Image (cartoon, coloured by chain):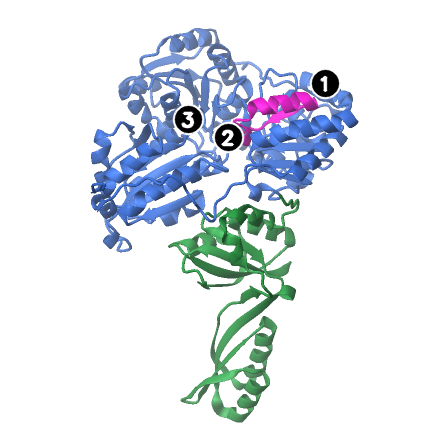
Chain colours: A green, B blue
């Protein structure tokens, strides 16, 4: 078992999130996190899905996802060639305000609110960075937190949305990386 | 300048534009606007007695003809009654379009009368589905639905249309081209994959053509015959592929799987190369997966990339239309054979020995009652390979797959994947509507028959003269067989008493059919001939058969195919075979 991040371009149509969620539920694939939002094209949304599974199951997940009519393109987002970010908002008690400020500074986080004895910290970063920040803040007493789920983007000029061009629909299929992967 | 028409008229014009000639359905509140233009349409609408019947009829029509079947129902319970046929069609890759009415768009989400979120309900059991609330979207949705249903790997598509979208005025414009960014089935196989597959075939000394229902979907039986004869390899046809390759052909070993022939099951187990064509390594074929065909490399040719590696690793995957795939494979294999022709003689000798030693068979019951296998065997012999046979699910289905000899594709219809009891009568109705000049026999169990027999009323009223053979063992026979084998013959709730109640002959008569009864072996042929002679009315024959007949051979659920039994407690005599 290992962690894999998928970027999935989907048609921005009603029910598409339910279709993806239903597929994962039906085939018993566990999602670690899922983030979805609009893209540069108003007709297309982008999902970033983090999964924990074996490599050959990942091929199957991608092939099954691609069968959904509303799914346009899928790509795995390996850490080495992509930028991974999560957003964290966390409320901590301000009893040790100066120490909290020091932690926030060390982790390049931001204080976005300080009211009624509570400091709200905002941070973005890779999953490990967010986890370390949370560990550092935990002793101060975390009242509540929210995380966005991971989003990821390929480094350099490569863009998943290039593959939404109709002529490349079939090549996308071949990029699924199934066990017997052939290029036309 | 086009004139405005209602969304309902736009729907019917769209169905006409899609080439629909018949649909099966029942009206109701939400779909009612559509039934007004249906009244004037050239499309034949067959009013069924239960929406499940509409769905299976559309499936039978599609399986018999290759064209897309269409069913139509109202919202709520009308739509939910289509759930079983939709799931059935999804499992067996049947091209189906289901139209359902939905409550008016303003009422959606309010738990309105006869509201059910059928799009949500059917998401996991359809290839795709739609909820339409704007009448302008109707033609595009219908065009896309037919395109998706009957291209690539076929499957069911549901189009749910809000009542107000049917009532509002709109312009009708049927799209000429369909562009779906996320749906582009790959039809042409990859050249390198074809070469790799041909190389594996040339290296193999124990190849088997493992043929699934995809061959029938792709209309690739002729190509399959050429490929099989070119390689000279034995062929096995799965439950969904019966008829894809002639049973009479010397290379045919029969059906593999839980109730497959010893030769077919053993061929897969001992093979060094599975040439898998439109099959999906279903658990009923593989038995315990970790012990399935352990020595075999796998060529997996399928139009659905998601089948590759789903259950079994593929050494070579060929994604594409099977007719194109086989057509490309033939010259590639010929080229390989020129370099080094294979010698399959020892392999064929072994398989032919198994085929000769362990043919399918049965015993006539000692108590003098009628053997169900005999009835089905005689039915197949008398009605012949040009008839269409439609089975329910259970023992009679397995016997019908074993003892009717199929020579042609689309002559064997059954619910293979979902295993839907009650499939036979409505599916036979749909098949007969699609193929009116062909004899259509439903081979049904007494349990199955009691689930959907009301469609015989539809048949009687609409001049759809199907024939039904009820294999009446007054039991849920397959479940009873499992109780015999695995539950110490404790027959919990499998006795139906259907030799006593209902009286199937009277029931047939009441539904406008001819009812016949047969409870003596010597009468079987004459009753079948009598049924064959009646062509102006549906016929139901109640064959009263031996209760404790069992389906053999059998690989128990979860067991290895190596542990196939040819009768209770009896394994093949492997020591006498050269394997």
The secondary element bearing badge 3 is classed as helix
Which x, y percent locates residue B479? Answer: 50, 32
**Dot 1 lies on which element?**
helix
| Crowd class of label 2 (few under 14; some 14 to 19; many from 20; radius 10 Å) | many
Mark 3 — residue?
B424
Specify the subunit that label 2 lies on: B
Mark 1 lies on residue: B353
Q: Mark number for residue B55?
A: none
Q: Is residue B276 left or right of residue B23?
A: right
Separation of disc 1 and disc 2 at Cα?
32 Å
Comparing A82 with B116, the one in front is A82
| Residue B235 is one of the magenta-drawn residues | yes
Q: In this image, B360 relative to A97: left or right?
A: right
Q: Toward the viewer: B571 or B281?
A: B281
Residue contact at pointers 3 and 2, CB within 8 angstroms: no
Q: Are marks 1 and 3 on the same chain?
A: yes
Image quarter in which the C terminus of chain B is found: top right
**In the displayed structure, does residue B537 sit left or right of residue B213?**
left
* Relative image position of residue A11 (x, y in whole percent): 43, 54
- Kindly identify the residue that appears in the image at 66 percent across and 43 percent down: B313
């Amino acid at each position: 078992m290992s962690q894999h991040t998928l970027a999935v371009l989907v048609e921005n149509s009603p029910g598409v999130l339910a279709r993806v969620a239903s597929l994962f539920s039906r085939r018993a694939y566990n999602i670690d996190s899922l983030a979805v939002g609009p893209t540069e094209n108003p007709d297309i949304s982008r999902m970033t899905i983090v999964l924990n599974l074996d490599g050959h199951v990942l091929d199957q997940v991608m092939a099954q996802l691609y069968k959904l009519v509303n799914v346009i393109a899928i790509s795995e987002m390996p850490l080495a060639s992509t930028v991974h970010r999560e957003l964290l908002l966390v409320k901590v008690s301000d009893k040790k305000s100066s120490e909290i400020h020091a932690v926030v500074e060390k982790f390049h986080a931001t204080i976005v609110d300080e009211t009624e004895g509570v400091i709200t910290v905002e941070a973005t970063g890779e999953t490990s960075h967010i986890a370390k920040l949370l560990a550092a803040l935990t002793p101060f007493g975390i009242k509540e937190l929210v995380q966005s789920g991971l989003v990821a983007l390929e480094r350099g000029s490569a863009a998943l949305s290039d593959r939404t061009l109709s002529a490349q629909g079939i090549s996308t299929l071949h990029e699924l990386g199934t066990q017997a992967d052939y290029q036309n | 300048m086009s004139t405005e028409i209602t969304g309902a008229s736009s729907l019917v014009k769209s169905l006409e534009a899609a080439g629909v000639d018949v649909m099966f359905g029942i009206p109701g509140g939400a779909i009612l606007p559509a039934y007004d233009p249906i009244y004037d349409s050239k499309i034949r609408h067959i009013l069924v007695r239960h929406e499940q019947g509409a769905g299976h009829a559309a499936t039978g029509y599609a399986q018999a003809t290759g064209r897309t079947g269409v069913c139509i129902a109202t919202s709520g319970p009308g739509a939910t009654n289509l759930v079983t046929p939709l799931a059935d069609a999804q499992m067996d890759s049947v091209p189906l379009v289901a139209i359902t009415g939905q409550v008016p768009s303003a009422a959606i989400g309010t738990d309105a009368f006869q509201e059910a979120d059928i799009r949500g309900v059917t998401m996991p059991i359809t290839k795709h589905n739609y909820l339409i609330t704007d009448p302008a979207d109707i033609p595009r949705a219908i065009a896309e639905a037919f395109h998706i249903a009957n291209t690539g790997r076929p499957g069911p598509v549901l189009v749910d249309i809000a009542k107000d979208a049917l009532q509002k005025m709109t312009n009708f414009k049927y799209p000429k081209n369909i562009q779906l960014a996320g749906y582009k089935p790959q039809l042409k196989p990859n050249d390198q994959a074809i070469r790799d597959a041909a190389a594996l075939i040339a290296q193999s000394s124990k190849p088997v053509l493992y043929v699934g229902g995809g061959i029938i979907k792709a209309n690739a039986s002729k190509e399959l015959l050429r490929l099989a004869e070119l390689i000279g390899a034995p062929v096995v046809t799965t439950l969904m592929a019966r008829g894809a390759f002639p049973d009479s052909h010397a290379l045919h070993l029969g059906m593999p799987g839980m109730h497959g022939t010893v030769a077919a099951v053993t061929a897969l187990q001992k093979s060094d190369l599975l040439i898998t064509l439109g099959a999906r390594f279903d658990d009923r074929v593989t038995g315990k997966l970790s012990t399935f065909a352990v020595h075999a490399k796998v060529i997996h040719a399928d139009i659905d990339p998601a089948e590759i590696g789903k259950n079994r690793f593929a050494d070579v995957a060929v994604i594409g239309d099977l007719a194109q795939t086989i057509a490309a494979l033939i010259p590639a294999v010929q080229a390989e054979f020129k370099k080094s022709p294979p010698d399959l003689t020892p392999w064929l000798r072994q398989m032919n020995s198994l085929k000769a030693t362990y043919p399918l068979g049965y015993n006539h019951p000692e108590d003098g009652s009628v053997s169900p296998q005999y009835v089905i065997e005689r039915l197949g012999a008398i009605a012949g390979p040009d008839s269409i046979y439609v089975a329910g699910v259970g023992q009679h289905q397995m016997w019908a797959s074993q003892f009717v000899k199929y020579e042609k594709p689309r002559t064997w219809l059954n619910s293979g994947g979902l295993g839907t009891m009650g499939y036979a009568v409505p599916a036979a109705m749909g098949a007969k509507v699609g193929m009116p000049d062909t004899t259509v026999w439903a081979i049904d169990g007494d349990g199955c028959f009691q689930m959907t027999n009301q469609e015989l009323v539809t048949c009687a009223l609409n001049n759809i003269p199907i024939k039904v053979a009820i294999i009446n063992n007054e039991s849920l026979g397959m479940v009873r067989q499992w109780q015999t084998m695995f539950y110490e013959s404790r027959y919990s709730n499998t006795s139906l008493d259907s030799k006593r109640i209902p009286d199937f002959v009277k029931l047939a008569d009441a539904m406008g059919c001819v009812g016949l009864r047969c409870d003596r072996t010597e009468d079987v042929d004459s009753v079948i001939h009598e049924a064959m002679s009646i062509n102006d009315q549906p016929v139901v024959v109640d064959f009263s058969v031996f209760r404790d007949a069992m389906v053999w051979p059998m690989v128990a659920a979860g067991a290895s195919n190596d542990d196939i039994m040819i009768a209770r407690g009896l394994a093949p005599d492997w020591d006498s075979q050269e394997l």
